[in-house]
Image: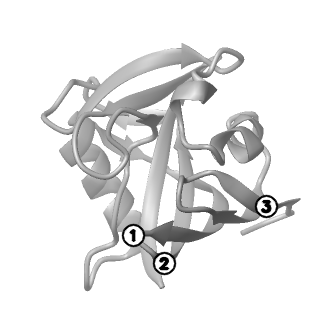
Amino acid sequence: MKQLTVLFLVRGNQVLLAMKKRGFGAGRWNGVGGKVEPGETIEQAVIRECEEEIEVTPNDCKKVAEITFHEQHNGTLDTLNVHVFICESWEGKPVETEEMAPQWFAKDSLPLKEMWADDPYWLPQVITGKLLRCEFWLDENDQVSKQEVQEVENL
């Protein structure tokens, strides 16, 4: 099972999303993150991806969700395990790179129609402090065919 990370910077009532400019997920708003490389911890991966994608070094990342995705890509079922983090402290200023264009949004005005189809089920909850374990089944059009979202005490 592939291990991935996603990180959302939060300041007050705002959350930083980034428009993916190329590759998988292009044209969608999301947090920053990506694959955990061989020999790398999940925490190292989330920091590296944030530095690569928006040139910010996050401090004190808090894990807020674990999400398992069962996806269809070109007729092949793929299972992904995504570790979701929130960070309220970082070094540097988010900047646009070749891969991502960051923008701040009010927590209550997320561009959910321009995000992944699963995001409305869990993202509003984790940015307000809930801890979640989720499982999503996505069809060949990246639409949610089945979902399980559970609030937990700890991860």
Which of discs 1 and 3 lies nearer the camera? The answer is 1
Relative height, residue 68 to residue 60 (above, below): below
Q: CA distance from mark 1 to mark 3?
A: 21 Å
User: Hey, which quadrant is residue 20 in on the image?
Assistant: top left
Q: Callout 3, which amino acid?
A: Gln
In percent of the image, x 60 and y 27: which residue is there? 113
Q: In the drawing, does residue 27 fall left or right of residue 72?
A: left
SS class, disc 1? loop
Q: Callout 1, which amino acid?
A: Asn
Where is mark 2, residue-wise?
A: 78
Q: Sort mark 2 into few (<14), some (14-19) or many (20+) by Cα contacts within 10 Å.
A: few
Where is mark 1, residue-wise?
A: 74
In percent of the image, x 24 and y 42: which residue is there? 53
Relative height, residue 133 to residue 22 (above, below): below
Which of discs 1 and 2 lies nearer the camera? The answer is 1
Q: Callout 2, which amino acid?
A: Asp
Q: Sort mark 3 into few (<14), some (14-19) or many (20+) by Cα contacts within 10 Å.
A: some
Front one among 146 and 109: 146
The reply to whether the C-beta atoms of the residues labelled 3 and 2 are less than 8 Å apart is no
Mark 1 or mark 3: whose residue is earlier in sequence: 1
Furthest residue toward left: 98
Q: CA distance from mark 3 to mark 2?
A: 16 Å
Where is mark 3, residue-wise?
A: 147
In percent of the image, x 35 and y 32: which residue is there? 27
In percent of the image, x 63 and y 51: which residue is there? 143
SS class, disc 3? strand
Look at the image and tell me in which quarter the C terminus lies: bottom right
Mark 3 or mark 2: whose residue is earlier in sequence: 2
Furthest residue toward front: 75
